[in-house]
Image: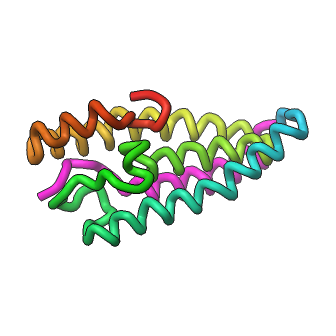
Amino acid sequence: MGPDVKGNPLYISVYLLIASYIIGEFIFPKYPLLYILNLFGLLIIILMPIVFFSSRNAFNAHEEKLLPQTETNKIIKTGIYAYSRNPIYLCFVLFHFGMFLTFENIMYFLCSIGLFFWLNNFVIYEEEKYLQDKFGDEFERYCNSVKRWFFFS
């Protein structure tokens, strides 16, 4: 049995996108941003699905399942996983942030913060505890050489 993760991060991310749109468009006011930030947000929105599918393909290439609750047989250390231990979760958070920058909807920003804290403190914590128990020193070395969130641990 895999890590004791409650919920599917992909589904939670999509549900938050829908809720952010509804609440942000019809309840909260818009907060105008500089046009360059809108373009930067659009770039993030375009790049994150590419990174997501690249990360997913690495799972498929190593014959691993994507759901966090499933058992793991090996640590993926190649491709994007040589730079970030959690590129898929990074994509979810940055996609929400990109939506905020592009559409100036504060709910996307608030959900990106909430999603980050949930993923970091509940999902990743459980996954890393499971991987540490299963792989021991190998996982410890991987953690020492690769950041959790690409730019910080």
Instruction: Name the residue rendered at 32%, 43% in the picture.
Output: 123
* Residue 66 or residue 60, whichever sits in front: 60
Determine the residue located farthest toward the top in the rendered image. 152
Specify whether residue 8 is painted magenta. yes
Is the C terminus in the top left, top right, bottom left or bottom right quadrant? Answer: top left
Q: Position of residue 69 (x, y in %)?
A: 24, 57
Figure check: 144 above or below 22: above
Classify residue 16 as left or right of residue 55: right
Question: Is residue 45 at all visible to an observer of this figure?
Answer: yes
Classify residue 72 as left or right of residue 98: left
Classify residue 96 as left or right of residue 102: left
Instruction: Name the residue rendered at 17%, 55% in the picture.
Output: 2
Q: How many marks?
A: 0
Figure check: 145 above or below 14: above
* Residue 100 or residue 19, whichever sits in front: 100
Q: Position of residue 135 (x, y in %)?
A: 11, 46
Q: Position of residue 73 (x, y in %)?
A: 15, 60
Q: Position of residue 77 (x, y in %)?
A: 31, 51
Instruction: Name the residue rendered at 36%, 44% in the picture.
Output: 85
* Predominant SS of the magenta segment: helix
* Residue 18 or residue 123, whichever sits in front: 123
Question: Is residue 26 at all visible to an observer of this figure?
Answer: no
Range of residues picked out in magenta: 1-29
Is the N terminus in the top left, top right, bottom left or bottom right quadrant? Answer: bottom left
Instruction: Name the residue rendered at 49%, 40% in the picture.
Output: 115
Figure check: 41 above or below 8: above
Q: Residue 142 falls in which quadrant of the image?
A: top left
